[in-house]
Amino acid sequence: MEEILHNLALYGYIILAFYSFGGGMLALAGAGILSALGKMDIGLSILVATVANFVGDTFLFYLAQTNKKEVLKYLRKHRRKIAYTNLLMRKYGWMAVFLQKYIYGVKTLVPIVMGLSRYDFKKFVVLNFFASILWGLVVGLGSYYFSAAVRAWFG
């Protein structure tokens, strides 16, 4: 078990960056727990996850906006999720960028669907920037303080 913790602490930031590129809630929560154990740094973990998440969502938006025909070929199987994503965007508007970070199953589809629509790229980048920061702070600090509280509870 100690060897696994050592490897996670050694390669944790690289794993966190790659996993956060496409979502990464579980990886950031794990980094928060490892930070509470003293194996990782919570500030660096939040920074790495936030930047990777921002870059990943921006990349998906840009990819969908510039390659609509090719992207639509891969989305034929996910019509229900796309319909749900469209409803989410219509109901919540710009807040969908913030909400999508926390909803499993649509967090990668929202940037793609927004990119397929005529949504403004600059507006998405600004919203995604703040949404990524909020996501990183909520998930990272939440897992850090919750795991510290659990450790204190069990002694």
Image (cartoon, grey):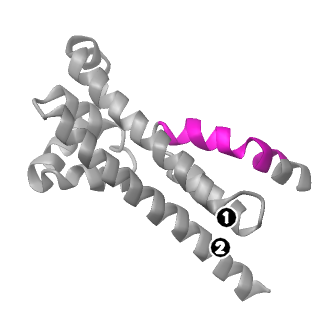
Could you say whether the residue bearing mark 2 is in a helix, strand or loop?
A: helix
The residue where tag 2 is placed is 147
Q: Is residue 63 above or below residue 138?
A: above
Task: State the mark number for residue 98.
Answer: none
Question: Callout 2: 10 Å neighbours few (<14), some, many (20+)?
Answer: many
Q: Classify residue 80 as left or right of residue 138.
A: left
Residue beneath disc 1: 33
**Residue 76 spot, x, y in % from top left:** 26, 22
Residue occupying image coordinates x 64% and y 56% = 31
Q: Position of residue 64 (x, y in %)?
A: 26, 23
Percent across and percent down for residue 4 are 84, 49
Q: In the image, what residue occupies the spot 28% across and 36% down?
A: 111
Residue 35 occupies quadrant: bottom right
Type of residue at label 1?
Ile
**Residue situated in front as seen by the camera: 154 or 135:** 135
- Asked whether 121 falls inside the magenta stretch, the response is no
Calculate the distance from the C-alpha at mark 2 to the C-alpha at mark 1. Answer: 6 Å
Q: Check the image and report above or below for 144 versus 54.
A: below
Residue 136, percent from left and from top? 47, 57
Q: Are marks 2 and 1 in contact (CB under 8 Å)?
A: yes
User: For the residue marked with disc 2, what is the amino acid?
Assistant: Ser
Image position of 116 with respect to 95: above or below: above
